[in-house]
Image (cartoon, rainbow, N blue to C red):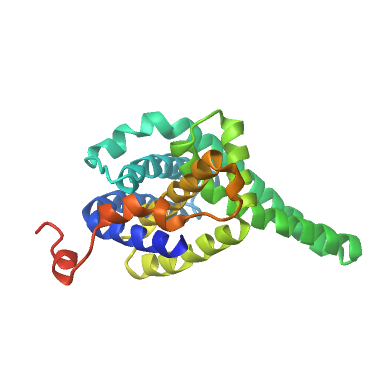
């Protein structure tokens, strides 16, 4: 399944390079805006902090809209790029609420780890280790939040719950998916966040949940199957849509 996830994400990215570029340009502007706030700090720390917070909120909103947009790419139904902006009004509440909640939890765990580490005793060590694993768990669960919002839409608390449950049900796979993000981040830095950039990473995460949904649908119909998942059969239709690739239609996909 993981191999097919790599294959599908690569071809989805390749076939929709222009769309991914366009979405990532918005994020590049936001990243530049975040960097620009550092120049305000010497003149007004309050003003710089306020600008930083506003741009961060905008980043969360656009992150949610981008996640909604790349779902269409993952489903082989890419929309015009203008729908990326129209989707903001449909996703901004869940994007902000989830983003702020996860951000707050991560910041608090980091502060807690720092506090317990400074105690210099066994209680401090135990507390810091506990918060470290909380930090790791939240980071791995947050990968599922936006895909869950778009594919398993429910109430806010249920979507948070589903994100953690999916991670806990697939811990090693989730770690592999997280590690798969790291080369994408490196390539993003080398390409100034154009490829794969935030949009490409969101596409990777959405494809991941898309395939996991196949697994849960199969288990719902075949509860006796246990962990024996016929991934080849479940991914057959997607594999046929990707189709055989030659060098020519890789370089010239419109031909």
Q: Quadrant of the C terminus?
A: bottom left
- In the image, is residue 231 above or below residue 99? below
Relative image position of residue 224 (x, y in whole percent): 61, 46
Quarter-of-image position of residue 64: top left
Residue sitting at x 89%, y 60%: 123
Q: Quadrant of residue 243?
A: bottom left
Whether residue 153 is visible to the viewer of this picture, yes or no, is yes
At 44% from the left edge and 44% from the top edge, which residue is drawn? 55
The location of residue 17, given as percent across then percent down, is 24, 57
Q: Is residue 222 left or right of residue 189?
A: right
Residue furthest out toward the right: 122
Whole-percent x, y for residue 181 in the image: 47, 62
Q: In the image, is residue 170 above or below residue 148?
A: below
Q: Position of residue 10 (x, y in %)?
A: 33, 62
* Relative depth, front residue between 1 and 34: 1
Residue 248 occupies which quadrant of the picture?
bottom left
> Left of 10 or right of it: where is 175?
right
């Amino acid at each position: 399944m993981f191999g097919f996830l790599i294959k599908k994400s690569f071809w989805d990215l390749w076939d929709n390079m222009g769309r991914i570029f366009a979405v990532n340009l918005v994020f590049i502007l936001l990243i530049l805006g975040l960097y620009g706030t550092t120049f305000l700090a010497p003149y007004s720390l309050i003003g710089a902090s306020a600008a930083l917070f506003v741009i961060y909120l905008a980043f969360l909103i656009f992150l949610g809209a981008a996640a909604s947009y790349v779902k269409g790419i993952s489903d082989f139904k890419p929309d015009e790029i203008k729908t990326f902006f129209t989707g903001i009004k449909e996703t901004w509440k869940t994007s902000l609420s989830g983003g702020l909640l996860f951000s707050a939890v991560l910041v608090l765990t980091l502060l807690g780890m720092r506090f317990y580490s400074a105690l210099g005793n066994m209680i401090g060590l135990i507390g810091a280790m506990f918060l470290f694993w909380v930090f790791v768990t939240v980071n791995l669960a947050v990968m599922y939040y936006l895909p869950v919002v778009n594919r398993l839409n429910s109430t806010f608390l249920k979507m948070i719950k589903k994100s953690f449950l999916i991670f806990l049900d697939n811990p090693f796979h989730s770690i592999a998916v997280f590690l798969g993000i790291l080369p994408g981040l490196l390539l993003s830095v080398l390409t100034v966040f154009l490829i794969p950039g935030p949009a490409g990473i969101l596409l990777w995460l959405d494809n991941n949940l898309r395939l996991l949904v196949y697994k849960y649908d199969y288990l719902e119909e075949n509860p006796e199957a246990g962990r024996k998942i016929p991934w080849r059969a479940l991914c057959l239709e997607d594999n046929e849509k990707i189709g055989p690739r030659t060098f020519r239609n890789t370089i010239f996909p419109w031909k």
